[in-house]
Structures are given as C-alpha cells and as structure tokens.
Image: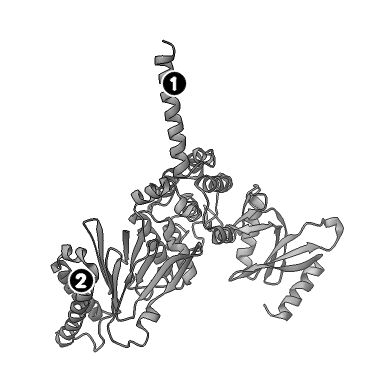
Amino acid sequence: MTDSEQKAMQEILREKGYRMERSLGSGAFSQVVLVRPLSKEAGERPLACKISDRTELALREAKLLQCADHPLFPKFRGMWRQGETVYLLTEYVCGDSLEEFLRRRGGFSQTQTARVGLALAEGLKFLHQMPDPILYRDLKPANIMIRQDGRVKLLDMGCACKRSDQTATLAGTVGYAAPEQLTAGGRLTFSCDVYSLGRTMEAMAGKNCGRELRRVILACTRERPQDRIPDMQALTAALIPLCGGGEAENGRTRRAAFLRSRTACIKNIWESNYKNK
Amino acid sequence: MHILTSHYYQQGSNFSTLLLQQYQCSRIPICLICLCGGENEAQGKAGAYLTGRLLQWFREQSVRHLVKSPEERLSALQDRLRELILCTDEELKSSILKSEEKNTEPVGILSVGEDFLLFGRGGQKIYLINRIFGRSHVRRLDGELFCGGGDALIFRRGILQQSVGLLFATRSFGEPMTERELGECLHVESVRTEEQAARHLRELAEGSRLQRGHNMSAALLLTGQKAADRRKKAYD
C-alpha cells in the first residue's frame, strides 16, 4: 500500500471514530490493521479492522461472522462500506498464530494437539449445527491464533460458506483442503472441515504423534468423504479420550509406569501368598 | 536406515514417465527412482523407452553384490548407467520415434543403504527437505546440481542423512507454491506410512491442477529411523 493510500485509509478511519495503530497483516485481497476507538465511551480495547476490495466476499464474511456467536470466533463489532471497499471490525485477538508457534517450537505433544483439536472441533460443530449450517473451508495453522492464556481462536471467515450454497467458488489452501474442495463440481459436506482439522492436527503433532492420535488423523484424512469421520460430533467423541492424559507421554515414563504397576502387582501377590501364612 | 517412498502420477493424458523400485536385501534398503519429463507424445514415448531400459538394466544387477560393498559398486554402476543412457539417446535419435533432436530429460536416484547416486540432465525439479535448527527447510537442488551442464548427464555421489526427504517432480508439479509452502504441505517429520506420503503428494498435485498443471508426476523418498531403533533409543 502506498503512503497516499495509507493516509486516505487513516482519514476514513478517523472519520468513523477510530485511530489506526499498525498493520497486522495483509493477504491477496485484503489488509488487516489494528485500530483503537478515539472516544472513551466506545471503550479502550483495540479492534482489528479488515479492509477488503472484494465487496461481495467481505459482505458475506460479515454476515457469517455475525452468526458465529461462539467463543472460538472473534466477536463481530461493526462494518461499513466506502464505495467498493468494505471495512469489517472484529475483536482483536492478541497472541501468535499456530503457524508461528510451530515454526518456533517445532511441535506439540499428543495431549496438547488433542486439546487444541477438541477446541476447534467444538467451535466448528457449532457452525455445522446451525439451522443453515456453515462450512469453514480454510482451517490451517495460519488461521488459528493461540492467545496468551492458551485459548484458541479461529480467524478469517473469508472462505466460509453456507452448506446449502453449493455454487460457492473453490476455496481452501493446498495441503489442508479436502480433495473435493479443490475440484470443480465436488460436493461439499461437513467432512471437508474434518479433513482440514485432521491435517492441522497432523502438522501440530509432527513426530510426536502417538498411535491413538495417528489413528484419528488417518480417519479424518481419507481421500473419499464417505470413508472419513463424518462430522465434528464424532470427531469430538474421538478426541476426548486423548485429552485427559497427563504429561507422562514419552516412552520412558510409560515404561517406568508399567514397571511400577507390575512391581506393585507382584508385591500384592507375594503379600497375599506369603505374608498371611 | 529406513526408507519410505511414495509417488504420484496424474491420471489421464500424461507424457511424463515415472519409475520407482524399492527392495530390501540383508536389511539394507535399495531404491531406484527415475523421472522423465515429456510435453508431447514423442517425448513421452522416448521417456517410456528410457525408463523401460533402465528397469531392465536394474533388474539384471546383482543385488547381493550391491549390498556387500555399495561404494565400489555404485562407482562401477555410475559408468554403466552413463553408457546406458547415452546409448538409449543414440537409439532414440536414429529410431522411427524421431524424438525431436532434444535428448530425454531423466532425473533420478539410486540408493543402497546410506549411499546414493544422483543422476540427471536437468529439466525436472529436485527438492531436499530436512530440518535445520529444529525448523523444516526446503531447498531446490536441480539448479545447483545441473547448472552449467547444458545437455550433459550429471552424476553426484553422497550419503543420505536421517530424517530427510528428496522430492523428484516434473516442472508443473507443486506450482505456484513457494518452497516453504511445499515443505509445510509435505510435512515430512509427521510422515510414517506410504499412505500419508501419497496423500501429501496428492494434495500438492490438486493445487497444481487448479493452476492448469499437466503432465505431472512426482516421487518422494524419505529417510528415517526404523520404529524398532526409535524405541531402543527411547529406552536407552
């Protein structure tokens, strides 16, 4: 964005009662900036403002965001249109993207992966169980924010669409999108989001992926939709048992725990056979 | 050393040729991959003829001798492989195929345990995927390997490291993704089975198909520790 464009944007935001602080990022068709309300009555919390030239897509995103009233999604705060440009205000999520997390730390443990996966599955289940179900269609580490308190937020509903709208354009990211999502004429179902969540968990767990989680991921990422876990309800049920484990996950502590339990068992048998005699 | 291979071949009209052979002898993995690009029917037939000859030649080699002293054998095989490819090129030029004056563009690898022999003439893509300082890193190798070679057949010898991946792909495969996106999509550190690797390749191919990619094929070679060695290391 040139300096004059940026100045024009700042002027428009000021007219609407917001002060631009800095840019948060930009994509192919939009830019996201951090803004703060000028008046104290509006509150002091900063907001994220998405500025997009794709009017139709931005209006659709705003409409879907208003429906997505769930803790997983940022709250809708307002929008306005200036010519062909749409300004969309949402809650600002402070934290790092999952992509950045993975780049820095390399991978999550199986339990952490299952917990994040469960949080995402719960939110997507909310979208899928709406009267007019919504498909998210762009689940990937870059769109997942990890807040400073460890909670997860899912950003960017730009690719979301209603399941009833089978004429929606192809959307998704290569590597995370289900095969039918990137094929013209492919039928979109809830299992598209299941596939993307499976791939995201695979990216999160990396080489720390245990046997149980790998089984769930494989069931999520089968090529044919009818062979996959069908919806988020079933995926949630599959992930819950994997979330309860403590931190003792590596082979050494599992073996130590096994030996302790075996020793305790032998001791019990000895006591019952010899001590009482 | 444990080797896992997978491949992708675009169905329908596809003039590229892919050869993938994997054996195990005395617990040592042996792998041969050869990819020949092609933009038209003549090049497709030339590539298929070359890979057919290569397969026949490979099956005539004594795998047991190869496994016993791989370094010596690979140097001897390098000369024979060069002779084979050059002879095949001569045959193709003078044959009824009349494949345009342009030589075939094979690229591939022959690995015996840790030792490998990389060969090719350029035209196709080779990516090295590994982890540096805990981060996934993708580097394109064909430019530096075949740079300045012109039409000459280039050979490179070396040792395969653990937990690396080599991706051999035709030109349009993986376009227009950047190397970083390619590495994220392939995600070699999480791959444990051939099915997983094949799925990652298919996802990449879907993205390229949207950009009107054609004549696509790819082969992926991943090195890693065997599950038994990993368990042994965990308990030590």
Quarter placement of the N terminus of chain A: bottom right
Q: How many marks?
A: 2
At horizontal 44% and vertical 21% (from top left) the residue drawn is A268
Question: Residue A266, can we see it?
Answer: yes
- Circle 1 packing at 10 Å, graded few (<14), some (14-19), many (20+), is few
Estimate the spatial distance between the alpha carbons at disc 2 and disc 1, rounded to whole Å. 61 Å
In the image, is residue B30 above or below residue A200?
below
Where residue B118 appears, x then y in whole percent? 30, 74
In the image, is residue B145 above or below residue A49?
below
Among the 4 quarters of the image, the one containing residue B220: bottom left
Q: Secondary structure at mark 2?
A: helix
Kind of residue at disc 1: Asn
In the image, is residue A261 above or below residue A67?
above
At horizontal 39% and vertical 71% (from top left) the residue drawn is B127
Taking depth in this image into account, of A76 and A121 the one nearest to the observer is A121
User: Please, which residue is most extreme toward the right here?
Assistant: A40
Where residue A60 appears, x then y in whole percent? 62, 60
Where residue B84 appears, x then y in whole percent? 17, 79
The tag on residue A268 is 1
Question: Are both tags, 2 and 1, on one chain?
Answer: no
Residue beneath label 2, please?
Answer: B73
Kind of residue at disc 2: Arg
Identify the chain of the residue marked 2, using the numbered disc in the image: B
At horizontal 22% and vertical 85% (from top left) the residue drawn is B99
Where residue B7 appears, x then y in whole percent? 31, 63
Quarter placement of the C terminus of chain A: top left
